[in-house]
Image (spheres, helix red, strand yellow):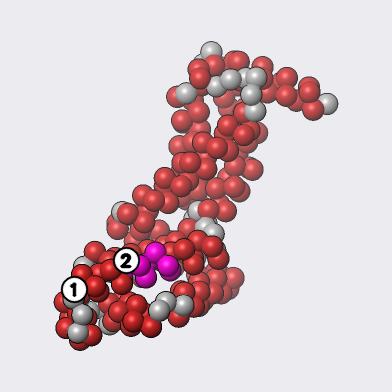
Amino acid sequence: MENSVCNEEAALLRKLQQGDADAYITLYNHYYPSLYTYILHFINVPELAEDALQEVFIKIWEIRERINPALSFSGYLYRITRNHVFKLLKKITADEALRVQVMQQLHHETNDADTRLLWKEYESLLHEAIGQLPPQRQKVFKLCREESKSYEEVALELGISRNTVKEHMVLAMKSIKYFFYTNTDGILPLLIFSTLVLDRITD
């Protein structure tokens, strides 16, 4: 039975290589549910997940002639999807307008009790990550982030150089980012991290 399914998919892929739209739609409909769920694991915003899925399949159509029907299409498809999602996450954290848009969408969804609970959990993780920083680095980080002081102001207050303040902030960010990535997944904690932390290191 499994061989039959594999042979059927290989036949569809050969048709896809030749530009057969019906084969393309059949593959799309087959993989859509599982792939959409997979993307949501990383990007828990339905609109973005849907857009990402469409972009993945557009890519599949564009590179259809390079697809090898003899190899696992499922593995190939998920590899492309994973790479695309990671690029999207980087784009979101780097693009302030896009980040704000996603944050607004996430805030809109916090009417759900489970989502509100997740926000509290991620905020608690952030405080826990900050609490693990060395005392001086923690002090610098809190002055910059929570009190919105400039590097010059913090340097003057603590009697250290501006470069030392910046170094503390860069190392603090790396530590907190590592803590988040090893204790969470998905876009929500990533956005909390980038919104509350990332902007402060470019002072």
Looking at the image, residue 159 sits to the left or right of residue 86; the answer is left
Pinpoint residue 70: horizontal percent, then vertical percent. 65, 19
When asked about the image quadrant of residue 14, the answer is top right
Q: Residue under label 1, please give it.
A: 162
Q: Quadrant for the N terminus, please.
A: top right
Q: Is residue 173 magenta?
A: yes
Q: Main secondary structure of the magenta part?
A: helix
Give, as a single range, the part of the protein colored magenta: 169-176
Tell me which residue sits at (54%, 74%) in the image. Answer: 121
Q: Is residue 47 magenta?
A: no
Q: Is residue 143 visible?
A: yes
- Secondary element under disc 2, as helix, strand or loop, is helix
Q: Amino acid at mark 2?
A: Val
Tell me which residue sits at (39%, 64%) in the image. Answer: 174
Counting residues from the N terminus, which is met first, the one under dot 1 or under dot 2? 1
Q: Residue under label 2, please give it.
A: 170
Q: Name the one closer to the observer, 111 or 66.
A: 66
Callout count: 2
Near mark 1 (Cα within 10 A), the count class, few <14, some 14-19 or many ≥20, is some
Q: Amino acid at mark 1?
A: Arg
